[in-house]
Image: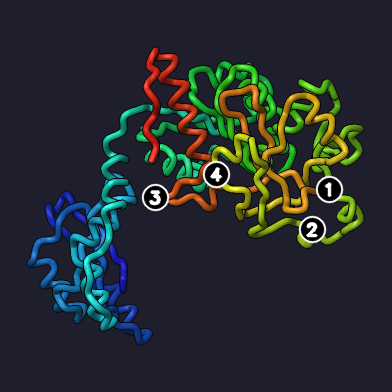
Amino acid sequence: MHVTLIPWIASAGELKTKPTQHSVKELRSIGIQPDILVCRCDRQLPEGIKEKLSAFCDVPVECVIPCIDAKSIYEVPLILEQEGLAIQTLSLLQMKQQPPELQQWQTLVKRMYNPQHRVEVAIVGKYVQLSDAYISVVEALRHAAIATRGELHIRWINSEELETEPPEMHLQGVDAIVVPGGFGSRGIDGKIAAIKYARERQIPFLGLCLGMQCCVIEWARNVAKLKDAQSAEFDENCLNPVINLLPEQQDVVDLGGTMRLGVYPCHIVPNTLAFKLYLEEKTLERHRHRYEFNNAYRSLFLESGYLIGGTSPDGRLVEIVELPEHPFFIACQFHPEFLSRPNTPHPLFKGLVQAAITRSRKLDGLTAPVQVS
């Protein structure tokens, strides 16, 4: 199956097949003959173009499949089904032809194109100039917006700017705030300022990996009054390392070997926001980090009004923290964005967007519940 471009040349007023002919020729020169051509184009392919591609590329005309530009990538599967890609693929593989179950996907696309609410989410990060650095977070938010019938708008906030400017200059008017993961000390105080703003202004908040660690530092400095609280990643000599290496990692030189990398089980604590979102006591989540919540501060953390919503199965590692005296304030040590899917959004993201829409509607004087699928 060869995906190829059929460009429209405006000055000539026609679609050009030469790029496809040349790419197929190059494939043949190394012994590869495509069975199907999937043709990227911005308009429908005339039959004459299909026949020309079929003749010059030695592919049956019914196996020349247009893939027309769509407003969203999530519409592409429906377009390809309509153009007969699945039928030709099953035929070539000599597999049974049967009607696809696309009703759920059709509903997803319909909801995406017909939102009922507008929701603006601020992503506060240090790599916002390269938005693809957070593409998984953006798509997870998009999945949640579709499920809650929301029209998602992202407000990109450079965390370094929050270190020198008041948070309200950048965050005023947003419906939710997300602080995603990352490494290194640059922009950390800006992330902490955004978290404080979300906590004090009752704005729905979700912290991811480093975002959770910044959440813990913000609590320690501004709630527990440990003004010098810090992560040992940023200052190994700090007096209050509320984020630290585990004791058995302290003397390890091979840093890569100490990283928690991959899927780990998480125990969800009953009677917490996390449990309300997950609706189960055990889940599997993907990790990529070295530093952890320092258990020496666990009692102080709990006494100040926070809750631990998730732990490792043995209860030793803190996976989720949350603030019950807040409409929606939760942070996790793992990366839930990696497990979100268009038709099954991750519970943490769906909960965040639902809380954001609810808050926005209350500000507009609306009280009807938000529909969620």
Specify whether 368 is left or right of 289: left
Q: Quick check: marks 1 and 2 in contact, CB under 8 Å? A: yes
Q: Position of residue 209 (x, y in %)?
A: 66, 43
- Relative to 7, say whether 88 is above or below: below
> Label 2: few (<14), some or many (≥20) within 10 Å?
some
User: What's the CA distance linking mark 1 and mark 3?
Assistant: 37 Å
SS for dot 1: loop
Quick one: SS at disc 2?
helix
Q: Secondary structure at mark 3?
A: loop
Q: Nearer the viewer, residue 373 or 57?
A: 373
Under mark 2, the amino acid is Thr
State which quarter of the image contains the N terminus: bottom left
Q: Which residue is mark 1?
A: 245
Residue named by callout 3 = 343
Please tell me whether mark 4 or mark 1 is closer to you in this view. 4
* Category of crowding for the residue at label 4, using alpha-carbon neighbours closer than 10 angstroms: few (below 14), some (14–19), many (at least 20): few
- Distance in Å between CA atoms under marks 4 and 3: 18 Å
